[in-house]
Image (cartoon, rainbow, N blue to C red):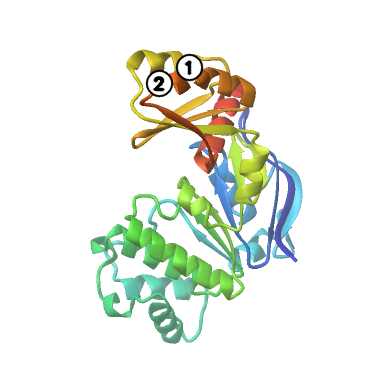
């Protein structure tokens, strides 16, 4: 069963089309990553899905409910974690969760709050003011508030922005635990390592969905070819390589250089002069998800221009 199944979602603000004919499906228990540059329409799409905005065109269902007619019912069954921390910083963790429990009319309130505190490891900090929490603990409080009413769908809008790597890993471990219990998750992110932890991903730019599938599907479907150059290139070699026919991306990775293009023969011809240099090695490499997204972003910018 698909928890999210929408087709042709479109949203305009004045003359600007922010979401343009987007199709998206998410199955029960899936973690789907939603990627794209700033201003690409990710947040607006999430708000259309959870009933905060009404589409100008398109149709579909969320949890079996119509996105147009049943927005109020959708909101009660969805947990939505916004980009910005949106809880009261002058209240304690427990007081914030009590407030949320009353909004959702959970009864008894005390039991719902205690269960949520325990489930997210917040009990020892329940009397700490939210404003004094680190980024990782604020994130955990926000997640607790989103799942305390036991939603069937969790929407996360760049939830780990500004959070340290350890807290990010712990957060994703928790997301996978929740998905293992049957919760469905749609999460927007800028981090490639987080995208690779999703079951499937979708890439959106300038309001249009450019690719969907597993990470392997998206990388394979990009048509990109990657070579790795080892050794220190002279400045003139770098300049010649950067403007060579067939070279679309050059990215340093430590002491190596990733050279990316879509035409293998042109790429090999551009790299051929380097193979005669005793201090330089050239070998085939694996195309990364970041390479693919840079290609998507560049292409979308050119079309928009």
Please state if 36 lies on the left or on the right of 281 as rendered: right
Mark 1 → mark 2, Cα distance in angstroms: 8 Å
Residue occupying image coordinates x 51% and y 21%: 271
Question: Of 160 and 42, which appears nearest the observer?
Answer: 160
Asked if disc 1 and disc 2 are in contact, CB closer than 8 Å, the reply is yes
Q: Position of residue 169 (x, y in %)?
A: 40, 61
Label 1, on which residue? 273
Find residue 36 and report its image quarter: top right
Label 2, on which residue? 277
Q: Quadrant of the C terminus?
A: top right
Q: Please, what secondary structure does the residue beneath circle 2 have?
A: loop
Residue 175 lies, with reference to residue 162, above or below; the image says: below
Local crowd size for mark 1, using a 10 Å CA cut-off: few (<14), some (14–19), many (≥20): few
Residue occupying image coordinates x 39% and y 18%: 238
Residue 271 lies, with reference to residue 180, above or below; the image says: above
Please state if 80 lies on the left or on the right of 164 as rendered: right
Residue 208 lies, with reference to residue 5, above or below; the image says: above
């Amino acid at each position: 069963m698909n928890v999210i199944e929408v087709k042709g979602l479109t949203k305009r603000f004045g003359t600007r089309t922010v979401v343009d004919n987007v199709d998206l499906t998410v199955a029960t228990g899936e973690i789907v990553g939603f990627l794209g540059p700033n201003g690409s329409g990710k947040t607006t799409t999430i708000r259309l899905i959870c009933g905060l905005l009404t589409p100008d065109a398109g149709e579909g269902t969320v949890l079996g409910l119509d996105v147009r007619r049943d927005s109020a019912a959708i909101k009660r069954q969805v947990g939505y974690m916004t980009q910005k921390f949106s809880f009261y910083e002058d209240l304690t963790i427990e007081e914030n969760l009590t407030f949320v429990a009353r909004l959702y009319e959970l009864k008894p309130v005390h039991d719902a709050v205690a269960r949520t505190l325990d489930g997210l490891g917040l009990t020892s900090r329940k009397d700490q003011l939210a404003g004094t929490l680190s980024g990782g603990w604020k994130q955990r409080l926000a997640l607790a508030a989103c799942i305390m009413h036991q939603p069937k769908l969790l929407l996360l809008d760049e939830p780990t922005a500004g959070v340290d790597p350890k807290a990010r890993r712990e957060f994703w471990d928790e997301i996978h635990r929740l998905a293992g219990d049957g919760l469905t998750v749609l999460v927007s992110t800028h981090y490639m390592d987080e995208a690779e932890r999703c079951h499937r991903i979708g890439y959106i730019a300038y309001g249009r969905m450019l690719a969907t599938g597993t990470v392997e599907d998206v990388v394979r479907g990009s048509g990109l070819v990657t070579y790795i150059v080892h050794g220190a290139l002279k400045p003139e070699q770098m300049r010649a390589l950067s403007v060579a026919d067939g070279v679309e991306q050059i990215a340093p990775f430590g002491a190596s250089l990733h050279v990316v293009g879509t035409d293998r023969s042109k790429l090999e011809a551009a790299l051929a002069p380097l193979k005669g240099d005793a201090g330089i090695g050239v070998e085939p490499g694996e195309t990364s998800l970041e390479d693919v997204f840079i290609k998507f972003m560049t292409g979308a910018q050119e079309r928009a221009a």
